[in-house]
């Protein structure tokens, strides 16, 4: 089911939260709405499912205008952060609830509950109550309840926020597996860029009620169109350095250090303010321009370490590398930067 938001506007009182947003979600894809708290991503999700009535524009499911259709009539499945399970009901009855409301036959309900429970791997838990389940199991129940009605659209509002790290990893792959197996169009709201990048076909990054960029995870990571987008994707995060163009070089602010511009950007005006974005995987490995600095932080991550390299002007570069025995905290090193892979932004944060 294709979803299209055309000039979507939402106000709360006198405050306009979303102003004339355009967004199209392709049939069968999983799209992430990613951004900081208060950026409008949950408001967009609630408008799609009908919880929020919009103040302008249209919402289309396929070619059908559902702008003024009730949430019940839109045939969407929603999984909330807190799961919203009925504590007094068994897991079977929780999952069956949407079909019970429709007054489906008992035989049909039993068949559908067992089928969807097997899909999400909780077939052995149907007689229990929610309080007897772990967080990950409750999350699967909420997902089963959303899917049993065979919705046209699956909406996920921070569904993994209450799980521990190991369960989040497991459920990321499980939700993606189920979405691919069912072929359902899905929208994931999250502030966690790892979730968005690992689970979704495309990401829409939002800030202050606007979509800044829509692309596949790989495209957006490699080619962010603003410094905000570049800073929001990547773990460990990208490091930014301020400087000015100086005869094909970038002279860093407060430093004697200069770095060459990538060869495709040699036409930037002399003296223009520039922000460089340098990702951790492009520092300290392979060939490049050597940069001296002091190791100011070392974080062990098992197979690899994260190093902070403090430059002479106080700026910090990050480097992610295999564990090294020749590097210690406080040591001065000279590490290469792959300057051809640097991201370059103007003073307004737009990619050059």
Image (cartoon, rainbow, N blue to C red):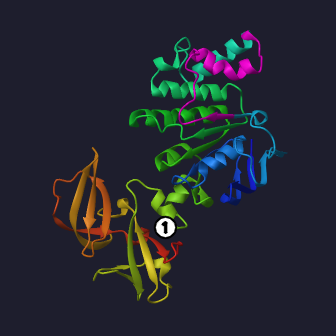
Indicate whether residue 114 is drawn in magenta: no
Q: Residue at x 49, y 37 (%)?
A: 160
Relative placement, left or right, of 58 versus 286 is right
The N terminus sits in image quarter: top right
Q: Note whether residue 286 is visible.
A: no
Identity of the residue drawn at 51% across and 62% down: 229
Q: Is residue 82 magenta?
A: yes
Badge 1 density bin: few <14, some 14–19, many ≥20, Cα 10 Å:
many
Could you say where residue 274 lies in the image, as x and y percent from the top left? 44, 79
Residue shown at 55% from the left, 58% from the top: 219
Query: Residue 108 location, x and y as percent?
Result: 73, 14
The residue that mark 1 highlights is 227
> Which stretch is magenta?
77-106
Which residue shows up at 76% across the image and 33% down it? 72
Residue 336 percent across, percent down from the top left: 29, 69
Nearer to the camera, 149 or 325: 149
**Residue in front for this viewpoint, 290 or 4:** 4
Left or right: 283 in relation to 193: left
């Amino acid at each position: 089911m294709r979803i299209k938001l055309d000039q979507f506007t939402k106000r709360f009182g006198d405050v306009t939260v979303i102003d004339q947003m355009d967004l199209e979600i392709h049939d069968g894809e999983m799209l992430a709405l990613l951004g900081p708290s208060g950026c409008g991503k949950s408001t967009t999700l609630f408008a799609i499912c009908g919880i929020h009535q919009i103040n302008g524009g249209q919402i289309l499911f396929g070619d059908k205008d559902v702008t003024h259709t009730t949430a019940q009539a839109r045939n969407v499945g929603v999984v909330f952060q807190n799961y919203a399970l009925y504590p007094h009901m068994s897991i079977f009855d929780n999952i069956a609830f949407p079909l019970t409301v429709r007054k489906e036959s008992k035989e049909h309900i039993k068949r559908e509950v067992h089928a969807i429970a097997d899909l999400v791997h909780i077939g052995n838990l149907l007689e229990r109550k929610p309080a007897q389940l772990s967080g990950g199991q409750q999350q699967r129940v909420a997902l089963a309840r959303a899917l049993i009605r065979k919705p046209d659209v699956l909406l996920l509002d921070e569904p993994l926020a209450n799980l521990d790290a190991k369960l989040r990893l497991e459920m990321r792959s499980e939700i993606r597996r189920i979405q691919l197996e069912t072929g359902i169009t899905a929208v994931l709201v999250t502030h966690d860029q790892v979730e968005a990048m690992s689970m979704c076909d495309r990401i829409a990054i939002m800030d202050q009620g606007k979509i800044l960029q829509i692309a596949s995870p790989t495209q957006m990571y490699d080619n962010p169109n603003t410094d905000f987008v570049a800073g929001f994707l990547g773990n460990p995060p990208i490091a930014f350095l301020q400087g000015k163009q100086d005869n094909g070089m970038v002279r860093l602010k407060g430093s004697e250090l200069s770095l060459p511009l990538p060869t495709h950007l040699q036409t930037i005006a002399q003296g223009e303010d520039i922000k460089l974005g340098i990702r951790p995987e492009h520092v300290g490995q392979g060939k490049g321009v050597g940069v001296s600095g002091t190791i100011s932080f070392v974080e062990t991550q098992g197979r690899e370490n994260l190093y902070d390299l403090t430059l002479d002007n106080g700026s910090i570069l990050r480097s992610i590398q295999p564990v090294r025995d020749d590097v210690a905290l406080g040591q001065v090193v000279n590490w290469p930067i792959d300057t051809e892979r640097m991201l370059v932004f103007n003073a307004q944060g737009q990619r050059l």
